[in-house]
Amino acid sequence: ASSGRTKAYEIKDSGMSFVCQAEFPYDDKALVTLEKYISSERLAAYVNYARGDRWVAIRLYERNTEISEALYGVIQALEITLRNTIHSTLSEQLGGTEWYETSILAESERKALEEAKKKVQDRPAVLTPGRVIAELTFAFWGRLFSDSYDKTLWVPYLRKIFPLKLQDHRSQIRGRLHQLKTFRNRIAHHERLMCGRQHVMQDYADILETIGWINPTIRRWVESTNCCQERFTKPLPKKPKPTLAVPAQELEPGLPSKVG
């Protein structure tokens, strides 16, 4: 019987076999090398958190990378959902997909728009609204909720994107988007999200809540397809020969509390 699927959508076994990654030797020489190339300054907070234990510090640094990787997809979902919703709404309300060509935008946003167009043309690629929208930054979309756009964008158009309980709270939405833009930049610049900065799980919850403000279905989809919770709670590997004066289990959780 036919499965109803066309050949174009079949995924076939390529015959390739995948080998597990080689085990890394976390000996003293390797730890010195890692600290040199990662930089002692970047590792300082992890070393301090681990009470000077370089092995634990490197493992915490690795966990930070894993959490950043997991969160990137969640923040990406927020950014794409937000910009596409705004684009769709303003296209409908302002007479077309090139709504950004009207005089409604302030000088700073018009400058960002011209830079986005230039990026598209420099590829080179045909200048289309979809490509222009994709080049505009998260900061650009957040600025559309500023005080200066209250009467021109928020009241007539953008407030309709959000549930009724938030339609009189533009400043709350603006503040949340600014907070999450800062968080997004921390991820993009490989900065520390844990070890003394313990609200990363709240940041995650805030991203999901903000997506839910726009569309609950998208929130449920993102929440069910990311691996953040797993990585938040995943224990660190067991250290072969613990040298810390504190019990090893206090340093095992992925997001442990400060020791001491």
Image (cartoon, rainbow, N blue to C red):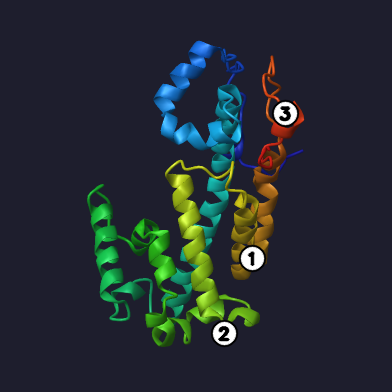
User: Which residue is painted at 28% across and 81% down in the image?
Assistant: 103
In front of the other: label 1 or label 3? 3
User: Where does label 2 land, which residue?
Assistant: 168
Name the image quarter holding the N terminus: top right
Asked if residue 239 can be seen in this view, the reply is yes
The amino acid at mark 1 is Gly
Splitting the image into 4 quarters, where does residue 111 fall?
bottom left
In this rendering, position of residue 218 left or right of residue 89: right
Percent position of residue 150, x then y: 43, 84
User: Where does label 1 land, which residue?
Assistant: 212
Circle number at residue 20: none
Q: Residues within 10 Å of mark 2 (few under 14, many from 20)?
A: some
Image height check: is 45 above or below 246?
below
Percent position of residue 234, x then y: 71, 35
Mark 3 or mark 2, earlier in chain:
2
In front of the other: label 3 or label 2? 3
The amino acid at mark 2 is Asp
Q: CA distance from mark 1 to mark 3?
A: 42 Å
State yes or no: discs 1 and 3 in contact (Cβ < 8 Å). Answer: no
Q: Nearer the viewer, residue 145 or 6?
A: 145
User: Which residue is painted at 68% across and 20% down in the image?
Assistant: 239
Secondary element at tag 1: helix
Percent position of residue 204, x then y: 62, 54
Splitting the image into 4 quarters, where does residue 2 fall?
top right
In this rendering, position of residue 188 left or right of residue 238: left
User: Where does label 3 land, which residue?
Assistant: 246
In this rendering, position of residue 11 left or right of residue 103: right
Percent position of residue 52, x then y: 57, 27
The amino acid at mark 3 is Val
Q: Nearer the viewer, residue 53 or 171?
A: 53
Secondary element at tag 3: loop
